[in-house]
Amino acid sequence: MPSREAEFARRSDPFRRELLAHCYRMLGSFHDAEDVLQETYLRAWRGYEGFEERASMRTWLYRIATNACLNVLERSGRQRVLPSGLGPASTDGPGVLAAYAPEIPWLQPLPDAAVADPAADDPATIADRHETTRLAFVAALQRLPARQRAALLLRDALDLSAAETAEVLELSVAAVNSALQRARGQLAAQRASQEDAMRSTSTDERVVAQYVAAFEASDMGLLAGLLRRDVRLEMPPIPTWFSGYDDVMRFFAERVMTGVTRRLVPIQANGGFGVAAYVQREDGSFRAHSIQVLEAEDGAISCVYAFLERGMFAAFGLPEMIDG
């Protein structure tokens, strides 16, 4: 007969990855989501003996995880943002950049490897995760009150019933439906409705390969052919951001393609593709520079999110330094 610990692991482990994705959507931070996931499983193990099976194991775990997320949000009182959530795009040219602002709680990228299971995920699961972990959608979620955010995710992203969502949030079904209605309305009012924020933006490997080639060769001509006219560039923790082909290309020409040697490693993040960028130092080695999440429409890049946080490289299983 298996031990209680083995039984708990057998029943709860299949939900780890989807719970991590849920915590990330709630918190906008991969590191915070990992911490909450650990707390969730510790609480679940401590309470497993008293688990009465009135709800499914999955719903019970979501209840613990969601309430742990709500506690984090209540304690912090701050929402995670992208630069575009702070103000309009810069019109001052690439030479005028705001200083790093590490005090701002920035949104973080999500490594796909942490939430994907290649052996079990079907195409529908992969598509749903892509749409609900896109950075634009996660950023829009952060502007919702915490319980409205939870209701929206549990009902619309996870397909829990109103009764299951009420069980998770310890609310009445009527209160859940009211919170869901308000959340949908607020997203629409922000011009970030689900239809807009979750539109298809699939970046394929061909686009990523050309993006890598453009930066490693400092080839502005190749890069020019990859960008949409409405492309955006955001670089947290720098609050300055750029919108539109001309401004983005000018920034790349004047501040990026300046003789620096780069090495880019393709990655998968937030349901799509991106790169981990390294910059060569005087000794010939390469130092971590940014984790870049790329979004594309109709085969052209619509947004570059360049996270200038070297600490994120470890989350993607990458070193901060590589040999020349």
Image (cartoon, grey):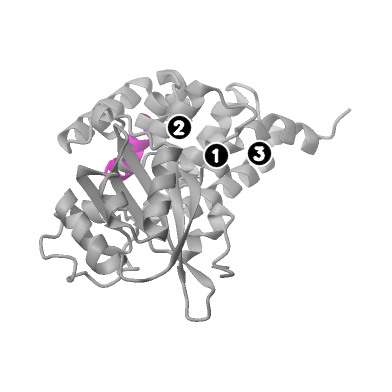
Q: Secondary structure at mark 3?
A: helix
Cα separation between marks 3 and 2: 29 Å
Is 205 or 55 nearer to us in this picture? 205
The reply to whether residue 301 is visible in this rendering is: yes
Q: Secondary structure at mark 1?
A: helix
**Residues marked 3 and 1 touching at CB (< 8 Å):** no
The x and y percentages for residue 76 are 37, 57
The question of residue 149 being in magenta is answered with: yes
Of label 3 and label 2, which has the lower sequence position?
Answer: 3
Of label 2 and label 1, which has the lower sequence position?
Answer: 1
Residue extending farthest left = 91
Residue at the disc numbered 2: 129
Residue extending farthest bottom = 282
Q: Secondary structure at mark 2?
A: helix
Residue that appears at 65% across and 29% down? 119
Question: Vertical placement of 85 versus 192: above or below?
Answer: below
Residue at the disc numbered 1: 115
Residue at the disc numbered 3: 47
- Front position among marks 3 and 1: 1
